[in-house]
Image (cartoon, rainbow, N blue to C red):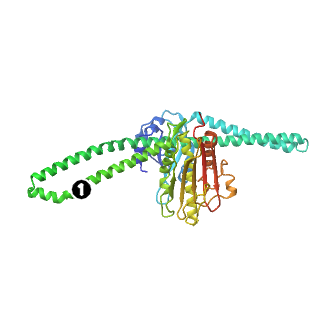
């Protein structure tokens, strides 16, 4: 992303955004950043990030290096020096736009947020965690000291220690979930904003294509009438007709308008899928078409399904049944589909990397067999009875062994490399399906024969 492209994108977003190099040079900012500092944007051009913050140069460099080397968003804290001499503590979220390489410097997008109250809450939460951790330590020391004196007291201390440890784990999990939820909300806001900005000019183009096509046809009819009444035009006109190849132009211009119409319709479909996936305006219960949520998720993941020089194309087989509209939380349900489909894609790519992608044959829970050869994902929907529907997502990857299978829905459990997985995807999916929708989610897998996730939710259990 160039500074010019950044400014074009940042202009429509209300969040304070900066584009910096890996060495800390400000390449571009938007107006909310200038307002936050009490400066004009022109005064920020070409300056270094170190000049605007109170943190040491070493700390800022370490933070930028962390952003440059991570594929995930890196959360940090920066204290800004305002033009009036005051300071402003901001929460920063950094993501690399152009990964660092020996040939080119990294471009880092920083999002700033004045979170004084939120920071206080996080500080308080961390303080409570530290206090509980110290309390756990004190209880363990007391347990060792009183072990020989009183067995009953030892049991009580152990029970108390266990309870405190569970509370500590719950607080740590809550802290991580808050960060994940905020990242998802920020992503949803950005997706919805981009979709809105794209939709306006595309709708204008699409709405005028019909008129442009009609005007062109009127002009071509005029040319045809002219040819009928003047079959032998002057040499200058005849030369121009031959130069522009009028006969080919008349045939091809209709095809051009058809191609443009198809292209704009495709863009509108993509925008609709982006807005449908984010569903920021549908956080409450609503009756929705489950298939629309699945299709919008597949649209978001479409680039990961395409063939590359390293992996073959992943084929998606849809076996949709006629489903009624389901009362649910649409955005949360889309998050479940995203987690399971993304995991299936990762499994298939791991299978291809191990040279087993073309030899795996999956027997699903419904005694159906996915086609051999080439990585595949099968998505099936069905009505179980008048109260329940089911969605199954199966892949023909490497499958899941028994040891991993027993921990699939545990928080922070992941088989992915460090930095590539949080271990919260399936845990959050379990909470959404079981606790939020009173449903069921299960996994069926045999090592070497793929995996199948089955989601069962009531059609309407909230009435």
Between residues 45 and 346, which one lies in front from this camera angle?
346
User: 377 and 151: which one is in front?
Assistant: 377
- Relative placement, left or right, of 82 versus 160 is left
Quarter of the figure with residue 448: bottom right
The residue that label 1 is drawn on is: 251
Left or right: 383 as drawn, with respect to 158: left
Tell me how many marks there are.
1
Q: Position of residue 118 (x, y in %)?
A: 59, 35
Residue placed at 9% from the left, 51% from the top? 229
Q: Quadrant of residue 251?
A: bottom left
Q: Residue furthest front?
A: 386
Residue 266, how many percent across, how many down? 39, 49
Label 1: element kind: helix
Outermost residue, right side: 149
Depth order, front residue of 397/104: 397
Q: Is residue 345 above or below residue 119?
A: below
- Residue 404 at x, y = what percent? 67, 55
Residue at point 83%, 40% (across, down): 157
Image coords of residue 112 (percent x, y): 51, 40
Tell whether 116 sits left or right of 10. Answer: right
What is the crowding at mark 1: few (fewer than 14 residues within 10 Å), some, or many (at least 20)? Answer: few
Residue at the image position 46 percent from the left and 57 percent from the top = 104
Viewer can see residue 55: no
Quarter in which the C terminus is drawn: top right
Residue 327 sits in quarter: top right
Residue 147 visible in the snapshot: yes
Tell me if residue 421 comes above or below residue 133 in the rendering. below
């Amino acid at each position: 992303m160039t500074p010019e492209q950044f400014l074009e994108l940042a202009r429509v977003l209300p969040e304070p955004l900066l584009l910096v190099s890996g060495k800390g040079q400000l390449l571009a900012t938007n107006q909310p950043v200038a307002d936050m500092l009490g400066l004009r944007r022109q005064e920020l051009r070409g300056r270094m990030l170190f000049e605007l913050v109170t943190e040491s140069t070493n700390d800022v460099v370490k933070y930028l290096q962390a952003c440059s080397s991570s594929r995930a968003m890196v959360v940090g804290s920066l204290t800004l020096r305002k033009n009036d001499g005051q300071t402003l503590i901001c929460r920063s979220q950094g993501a690399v736009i152009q990964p660092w390489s020996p040939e080119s410097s990294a471009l880092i997008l920083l999002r700033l947020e004045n979170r004084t109250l939120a920071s206080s809450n996080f500080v308080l939460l961390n303080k409570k965690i530290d206090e509980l951790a110290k309390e756990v330590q004190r209880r363990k020391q007391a347990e060792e000291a009183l072990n020989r004196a009183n067995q009953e007291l030892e049991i009580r201390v152990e029970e108390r220690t266990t309870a405190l440890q569970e509370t500590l784990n719950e607080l740590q999990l809550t802290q991580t979930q808050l960060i994940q939820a905020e990242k998802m909300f920020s992503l949803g806001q950005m997706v919805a904003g981009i979709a809105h900005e794209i939709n306006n000019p595309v709708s204008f183009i699409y709405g005028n294509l019909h008129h442009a096509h009609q005007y062109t046809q009127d002009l071509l009819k005029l040319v045809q009438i002219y040819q009928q009444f003047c079959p032998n035009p002057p040499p200058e006109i005849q030369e121009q007709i031959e130069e522009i190849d009028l006969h080919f132009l008349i045939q091809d211009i209709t095809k051009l308008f058809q191609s443009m119409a198809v292209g704009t319709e495709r863009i509108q479909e993509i925008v609709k899928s982006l807005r449908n996936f984010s569903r920021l305006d549908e956080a409450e219960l609503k009756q929705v078409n489950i298939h629309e949520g699945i299709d919008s998720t597949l649209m978001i993941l479409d680039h990961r399904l395409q063939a590359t020089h390293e992996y073959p194309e992943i084929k998606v087989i849809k076996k949709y049944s006629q489903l009624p509209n389901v009362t649910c939380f649409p955005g949360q349900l889309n998050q479940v589909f995203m987690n399971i489909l993304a995991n299936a894609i990762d499994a298939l790519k791991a299978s291809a990397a191990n040279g087993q992608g073309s030899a795996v044959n999956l027997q699903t829970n419904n005694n159906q067999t996915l086609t051999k050869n080439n990585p595949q994902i099968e998505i099936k929907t069905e009505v179980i009875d008048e109260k329940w529907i089911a969605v199954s997502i199966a892949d023909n990857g490497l499958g899941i062994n028994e040891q991993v299978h027993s921990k699939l829905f545990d928080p922070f459990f992941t088989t992915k490399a460090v930095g590539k997985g949080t271990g919260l995807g399936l845990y959050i999916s379990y909470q959404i399906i079981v606790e939020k929708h009173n449903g069921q989610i299960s996994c069926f897998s045999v090592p070497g024969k793929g995996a199948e996730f089955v989601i069962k939710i009531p059609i309407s259990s909230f009435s």
